[in-house]
Image (cartoon, rainbow, N blue to C red):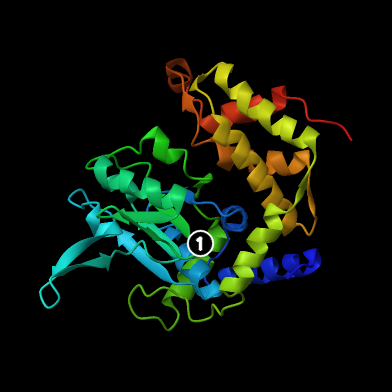
């Protein structure tokens, strides 16, 4: 696949396929698709019952990719997700038992319930696309994407994600409550001829295969990005490091996430070049996991989104 308009059609088909299961949340779906095309991982934050698991299931089903779900708990060990080596009694040799990370779409559900030792086991997986077991590196299949979820309200029995791990996520996506009409549609879909709480995935048909996803990712990587657009991304990331209300600003991965996301966003629009508007489009999900609020901003009730919007308003965009 080398045709930009065809890529736009395929991505719209993927969006439509997900919509057969996921009602509303168009911004969330779009940001997940941008992260997918940009070969990035996402952290989805929202209270229970908003469709985080449904979104990931629908995404994997619409792409015919291998899918695995890990429900994180406080007693989970790193080997529970990466795998381990065991002695084969018949051959007296070590045999590797692969964990659930050996998949293509990994749902890390309630990731902040796992202790730091287990959370850190995902760092190598997310950054290097490999798992080291008994000193031997095992490559993960590609495309590979981690979609982690966490509940921002409940803190009992949770372990905040370290900054190093937050930085490995391309986007932090916030999912909110649906509108009244969307919520009524959800209730209708789930209760109409459905027993129990079974997810309504029967109408989600595959529209992309592994080769198609890899081709889209390669096309996004080949998008043209003007030097002024790159400079704009760098200036936004650097502005967060000394902006009032922020205790910690974005590092270099922040600028990288802006450019990677902008390239993918341009592909969704059917263009072969990124613009400053594409940078603005992905700025909030790309940076909100890379900054920390100062105490005075917390006392004033300001959010990371508020301050990041102020950063963008204070950073002039390049003119054509």
Residue 173, given in percent of the width and then of the height, sits at 52, 47
Residue 194, given in percent of the width and then of the height, sits at 40, 81
Say which residue appears at 43% left-offset and 62% top-offset. Answer: 140
Residue 209, given in percent of the width and then of the height, sits at 58, 75
Front residue of 240 and 37 = 37
Residue 226, given in percent of the width and then of the height, sits at 80, 39
Say which residue appears at 63% left-offset and 22% top-offset. Answer: 239
Is residue 115 visible to us here? Answer: no
Q: Is residue 81 left or right of residue 246?
A: left
Secondary structure beneath disc 1? Answer: helix
Residue at the farthest right position: 320
Q: Quadrant of residue 70?
A: bottom left
Say which residue appears at 38% left-offset and 42% top-offset. Answer: 152
Task: Residue under label 1, please give it.
Answer: 183
Q: Is residue 51 left or right of residue 2?
A: left
Above or below 167: residue 56: below
Q: Quadrant of residue 3?
A: bottom right
Front residue of 86 and 162 = 86
Above or below 299: residue 181: below
Residue at the farthest bottom position: 193
Say which residue appears at 71% left-offset and 26% top-offset. Answer: 313
């Amino acid at each position: 696949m080398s045709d930009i308009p065809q890529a736009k059609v395929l991505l719209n088909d993927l969006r439509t396929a997900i919509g057969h299961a996921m009602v509303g949340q168009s911004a969330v779906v779009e940001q997940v698709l941008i992260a997918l095309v940009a070969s990035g991982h996402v952290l989805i934050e929202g209270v229970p019952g908003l469709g985080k698991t449904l979104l990931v299931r629908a995404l994997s089903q619409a792409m015919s990719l291998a899918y695995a779900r890990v429900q994180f708990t406080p007693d989970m060990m790193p080997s529970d997700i990466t795998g381990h080596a065991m002695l084969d009694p018949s051959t007296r040799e070590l045999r590797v038992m692969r964990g659930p990370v050996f998949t293509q779409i990994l749902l890390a559900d309630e990731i902040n319930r796992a202790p730091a030792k287990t959370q850190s086991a995902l760092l190598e997986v997310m950054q290097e696309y490999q798992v080291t077991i008994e000193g031997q590196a095992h490559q993960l299949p590609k495309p590979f994407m981690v979609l982690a979820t966490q509940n921002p309200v409940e803190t009992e029995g949770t372990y905040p994600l370290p900054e190093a791990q937050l930085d490995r996520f391309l986007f932090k996506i916030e999912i909110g409550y649906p509108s009244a009409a969307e919520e009524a549609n959800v209730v209708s879909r789930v209760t109409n001829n459905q027993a129990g709480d079974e997810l309504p995935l029967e109408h989600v048909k595959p529209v992309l295969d592994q080769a198609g996803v890899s081709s889209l990712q390669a096309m996004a990587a080949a998008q043209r990005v003007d030097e002024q657009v790159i400079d704009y991304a760098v200036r936004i990331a650097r502005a967060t490091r000394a902006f009032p209300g922020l205790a910690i600003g974005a590092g270099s991965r922040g600028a990288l996430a802006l450019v990677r996301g902008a390239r993918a966003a341009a592909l969704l629009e059917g263009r072969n070049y990124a613009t400053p508007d594409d940078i603005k489009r992905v700025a909030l999900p790309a940076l909100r996991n890379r900054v920390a609020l100062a105490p005075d901003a917390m006392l004033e009730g300001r959010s990371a989104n508020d301050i990041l919007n102020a950063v963008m308003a204070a950073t002039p965009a390049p003119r054509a």
